[in-house]
Amino acid sequence: MMTAPWRDSTLPAEARVDDLLSRMTLEEKAAQLYGVWVGASTDAEAGVAPHQHEMATDWNWDEVIAHGLGQITRSYGTAPIAPDEGARALARAQRAIMAANRFGIPAVAHEECLAGFTAWGATAYPVPLAWGASFDPRLVEELGRRIGSDLVAAGVQQGLAPVLDVVRDLRWGRVEETIGEDPYLVGTVAAAYVRGLESAGVVATLKHFAGYASSAGARNHAPVRAGGREFADVTLPPFEHGLRHGGARSVMAAYTEIDGVPSHSDPTLLTDLLRERWGFTGTVVADYFGVGFLESLQRVAEGLGDAARVALEAGVDVELPTLRCYGEPLVEEVRAGRVPEDLVDRAARRVLLQKCELGLLDEGWSPEPEGPLDLDSPANRALARQLAEESVVLLANDGGVLPLGPSAGRRIAVVGPRADDAMAMLGCYSFPSHVLPHHPEVGLGVEIPTVLESLRAEFPDAAVEFATGCDTQDPDTSGFADATSLASSCDVVVAVLGDRAGLFGRGTSGEGCDASDLTLPGAQGELLDALLETGKPVVLVLLTGRPYALGRWADRLAGVVQGFFPGEEGGPALAGVLSGRISPSGRLPVSVPREPGGQPWTYLQPPLGLANDITNLDPTPLYPFGHGLSYAAFEWGDFEAPASGAEIGTDGTYEVSATVRNTGDVAGAEVVQLYLHDPVATVTRPDVRLIGYQRVELSPGDARRVTFRFHADLSSFTGRAGERVVEPGRLELRLAASSADVRHVFPLTLTGGTRVVGYDRELLCETEVTKAE
C-alpha cells in the first residue's frame, strides 16, 4: 500500500500539509484549532485560570476526539499525579485520539513551565524575577534546556513560557512571573530560556503578546492605556529578542485590550506586525478562555461563533484551554457563510506545519514513554540551587553583622511567618502553589528546606531558635510578645518576611493578587518595628514576588537580603549567603521603592519622571535597578575607548572597555552594566536605559577585561512619525554597577543623517571578557 504524501517524511513539510488539508473535512480542520482540558474544575474556589468555573463546558471525550484534536491541555498540571502514571495516562489519551480520527493525527500536549515543569514531583525552580536578578543568560539557557528535556521525556511538546512582559507597575500581582522592569534585561534573559526549551525540542510560547503588564492601576486584566511609543519601545522589544535570538515557535495573545482593542481581536498586532513585518511563521495560541472573553468580558463579539470569527480573523490559530468557540460554533459560522473557510484553512495549516516539525505526522510516531521519569533529579536540584544562589540580592550591609560567619556558641533568633514554611520559596505557577491548595491531603512532591531548617543545617554549633511573630496576611499582632522576647535573648535576629503566592486573591503575590500599595503585607511591617525596638541587630530576609517599600527601615537594619521566590533550593542558598559560604551576586531586576505609595514608577523615566522641584513627591527608589552588594571587593579601572575619537555614523559601532579586579579576600561575581544616556532627542527619552551587561566571576586577586561593542542601532527609538530611528547627536555610554552607580562616562557623537531601522536592526550589545594582568 502506497504511503500518502502527507505521511512521507522525505517531502517538504509544506507539501505534506497541503496534501493533508486537501483530504480533510471542515470539521476535521476545525478540530485542529482547539484544545481539550480533561479534569478542569468548575468550582469557583478551585480554578487555576480566570473565570474557569464559568467558561469550562461539558463535553463527551469520544465525541470530541472523533474528528481529531489540536491540543491536550495540562495533563500533568491539573491534579497531582505521579509522573510515570501521568506519562502512561497521556500516552493512552494520545492513542485514543489517533485511533479516533481518520488520519491518526495526535494532539500537541502543552504544559506550563514558568518556574519548572508544572507537574507533581517536578523540580520547583526560582521564578523568572529571580532569573533576572541573576543577570546570567547562560545559566537560564541551561535551565530552559533541562526543563525542556523533562517535558519531552514526559510526552509534552509545547511549553507555555516564558513571560516577556516588562514591569510597569510593581503593584501588579504577576511581577513575580516577569524578568524585570527593563526591556533589554527581559529580552536577553527570556531569549536564553527560549533557546534552552527549543534546543530540547519543545515549542516555546512567548507570552503575553502584548502589553499585559501595563494594565491601568496594576489591576489584572484591566485595560492598557499605554501610548504607541511606549508600546513600541518598551513592550515589544523583548518579543523581538524571543523570536530573533530565541527562535520561539509560538506566541500567546494577551488578555489585554489596548486603546479599546483586545489583543485576541487585533489583526494589526497578530497579523500585520507579528507575521507580515516580523516574519513569524509559527502558531498564535489564545490565553486561557481569551477567545470566549471577547464575548463575555470585552463585548466585542455577539455570541460564541462571532467570537470565533473575530479571533480567527485577527490571527489566533488555537483556542485554549478547551473547546468553546472554535468547535461547533465556528463550524456553524462557516456553514452559514459568515466566516470564510479560508480562515480555518490558514490556522489549520499553521497548526499542522508545527505538528509536522514535531514529527507528529510521521508514520512511526509513538506516544509511549521511554522509561521511568525522574523530574527532580540531582542534576535538576543542583541547577536550581545554583540559580537560587546567583539570584539572591544583598541590598544593604550596614551593621558589620553579615556575613554571620562561624556561630559556635551564638544564639540566633529566626522570626517571621516566612521562616518555617516551604511554600515561602515558591511562586504561584509552581505546582505546589498552583494546584496543591486544592489537594491538602497530598504532599509537596519535592523536598523544600525552609529558611529555618537551612540555617540550623548551616550553623550546627549555634542555637537557632524560632518564633512566628505573625501571619503573612492577617493583621493579628498577638504573636509579637513571644517574638520580641526571643529576639531580646539572642545575639542576632534574622527576620524572614514576605509574600504568600496564590491565585485570584488567595495570596499576596501571583495572578490576580494585585496590591493597592507596596506596604509589606499584614502585620509584618509592625513586627519588624517591634524587633528593631529590642536593640538587637536585625537582618531582614525577604521572600517575595515583588519589591516592597523599605524606606521606613532604611539605616536601621544590620542587613537586608532579597530573595525573589528562589525555589526548592532557596533555603540553603539564603543560608549560605547569610553565613558567608556564598558571596551574594544578584542584582535588582526591579527597583526597590522608598515609600509604599510612590508608584507606579520604574527607572525608565524621562526628566520629568524623576525627582524635581515641581512636585513634593520624590519617586527616587531606595535601591535602584541593577543594585546589589557582595562580600567580595571590586575595583574598576583602565577605562578605554578608541583613540581615533568619539564619533561614529548612525550605522557605526564603538567599543568601550574596563578592567574589573577582585581586591577582596573571597571569590565573587561583579555585574558590569552599560547604560545609554541621550541628552537631546526629538521625543523625550529615559534618562538612562540598560543596553548591555556582563556577569564576571572573579577569584581573589583576579582581573578581567570587559569590552562592550555598542552599535548605533541600540540608541534607536520611535520618532514622531512613528518609525524607529537612529538620530545623529550626542550620547553618553555609562559603565555602571547599577542604574545609579556610574563608574565611567564615555561621550559619543553620532554623525550623518537620521536613519530609519526596523525589525532587522541590531538588538544585542556584543560583549567580550578576556584575562587581564
Image (spheres, helix red, strand yellow):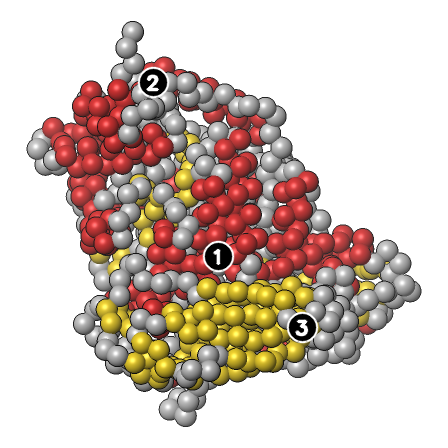
Disc 2 designates what residue? 104
Three-letter residue code for mark 3: Glu
Identify the residue at horizontal 28%, vertical 29% (top origin).
12
Labels 1 and 2: the sequence-earlier one = 2
CA–CA distance in space, label 1 to label 2: 39 Å
Above-or-below relation of 224 to 384: below
Labels 3 and 1: the sequence-earlier one = 1
Labels 3 and 2: the sequence-earlier one = 2
Identify the residue at horizontal 21%, vertical 75% (top origin).
720
* Percent coordinates x, y for residue 708 in the rendering: 48, 70
Asked if one can make out residue 322 in the rendered structure from this viewpoint, the answer is: no
At mark 2, the secondary structure is loop
Would you say the residues marked 3 and 1 are in contact, meaning their CB atoms lie under 8 Å apart? no
Judge by depth and name the residue closer to the eye, 523 or 476. Answer: 523
The picture quadrant where one finds residue 633 is bottom right
CA–CA distance in space, label 3 to label 1: 31 Å
Disc 1 designates what residue? 189
Identify the residue at horizontal 30%, vertical 33% (top origin).
353
At mark 1, the secondary structure is helix
Taking the view exactly as shown, the residue that stands out farthest to the bottom is 613
The picture quadrant where one finds residue 372 is top right
At mark 3, the secondary structure is loop
Taking the view exactly as shown, the residue that stands out farthest to the right is 409
Callout 2 environment at 10 Å: few (<14), some (14 to 19), or many (20+)? some
Disc 3 designates what residue? 773
